[in-house]
Image (spheres, rainbow, N blue to C red):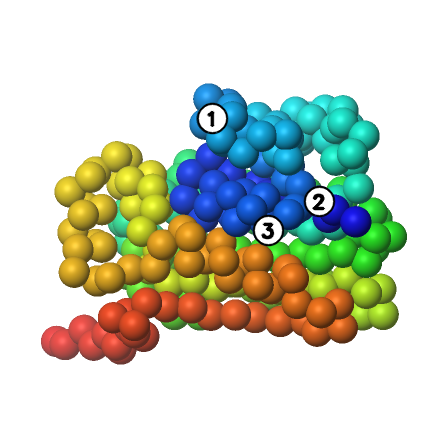
């Protein structure tokens, strides 16, 4: 039987790579994101194994309208990949933009838990799986990471809480926590500063969207009795931040 995955944030980076990886492995995919033109290009590339739904994950009305009108063969969702998320700004907390903080919380936390709650009944019925995209920022703080790191720490802990609540249902839950992945992440965070993105990734041999997508597929296709609780990944050239000391 063909399994169906719903992947949020599918217009670029890890999300788009995940859609390709899952379709190439024989899955059907519901690909969601804000940029309809990119979703249409993905569907044109991959064919009728992909159903696209353009909406902002923060917009519950648009989300529900899209999910309530899924074609029949896409209605049974076996896997939810909560990939949509973003970081905005690099300023320290005392000078950060409060609206950027709200956007990160609304996207990375509120939208994620709302979609998860909506799909839980059928995921339980189908003994499905949930894979949440967290980050190493959930465990290792860095200057300017403030609310972004806080949202990803929430995702990590929410995943573990789901595992606890869903014990005995057959539903698997995994928190994927990548380090440096070269995608549009830094461009979005810096408002389109290509030089900042090039500087961050230059010489670091970072992970790619495809690396993480293949990891997601590996987790999803493990035997049904096996659960990966948390999986932290970094490129070899990246390691844990050192302690800061402010000297007087």
- Give SS at disc 1: helix
Q: Earlier in the sequence, mark 2 or mark 1?
A: 2
Q: Quadrant of residue 168?
A: bottom right
Res. 131 mark = none
- Give SS at disc 2: strand
Cα gap from disc 2 to disc 3, whole angstroms: 11 Å
Q: Which residue is mark 3?
A: 25
* Above or below, 37 relative to 5: above
Q: Residue at x 79, y 49 (%)?
A: 1
Is 124 situated left or right of 107 in this image? Answer: right
Q: Position of residue 223 (x, y in %)?
A: 71, 69
Q: Quadrant of residue 97?
A: top left
Furthest-left residue in this view: 248
Foreground mark, 2 or 3, reads: 3
Q: Position of residue 15 (x, y in %)?
A: 49, 44
Foreground mark, 1 or 3, reads: 3
Q: Which residue is mark 1?
A: 41
Cα gap from disc 2 to disc 1, whole angstroms: 20 Å
Q: Residue at x 47, y 26 (%)?
A: 41
Asked whether residue 102 appears in the rendered view, the answer is no
Q: Earlier in the sequence, mark 1 or mark 3?
A: 3
Q: Earlier in the sequence, mark 2 or mark 3?
A: 2
* Above or below, 39 relative to 22: above
4, 56: nearer the viewer? 4
Q: Residue at x 28, y 35 (%)?
A: 191
Q: Residue at x 46, y 22 (%)?
A: 37
Res. 4 mark = 2
Q: Residues within 10 Å of mark 2 (few under 14, many from 20)?
A: many
* Above or below, 13 relative to 235: above
Name the quadrant of the C terminus: bottom left
């Amino acid at each position: 039987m063909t399994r169906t995955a719903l992947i949020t944030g599918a217009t670029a980076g890890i999300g788009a790579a995940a859609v390709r990886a899952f379709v190439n492995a024989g899955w059907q995919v519901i690909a969601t994101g804000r940029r309809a033109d990119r979703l249409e290009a993905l569907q044109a590339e991959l064919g009728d194994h992909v159903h696209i739904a353009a909406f902002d994950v923060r917009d519950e009305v648009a989300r529900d309208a899209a999910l309530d009108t899924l074609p029949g063969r896409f209605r049974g969702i076996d896997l939810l990949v909560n990939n949509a998320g973003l970081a905005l700004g690099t300023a320290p907390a005392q000078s950060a933009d409060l609206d950027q903080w709200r956007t990160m919380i609304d996207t990375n936390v509120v939208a994620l838990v709302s979609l998860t709650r909506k799909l839980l009944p059928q995921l339980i019925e189908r003994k499905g799986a949930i894979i949440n995209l967290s980050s190493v920022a959930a465990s290792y703080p860095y200057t300017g990471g403030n609310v972004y790191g806080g949202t990803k720490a929430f995702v990590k802990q929410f995943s573990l809480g789901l595992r606890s609540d869903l014990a005995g249902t057959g539903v698997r839950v995994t928190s994927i926590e990548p380090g440096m992945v070269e995608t549009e992440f830094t461009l979005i965070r810096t408002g389109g500063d290509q030089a900042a993105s090039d500087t961050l990734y230059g010489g670091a041999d970072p992970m790619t969207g495809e690396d993480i997508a293949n990891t997601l597929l590996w987790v999803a296709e493990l035997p049904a009795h096996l659960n990966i609780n948390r999986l932290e990944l970094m490129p070899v050239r990246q390691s844990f931040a050192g302690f800061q000391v402010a000297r007087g």
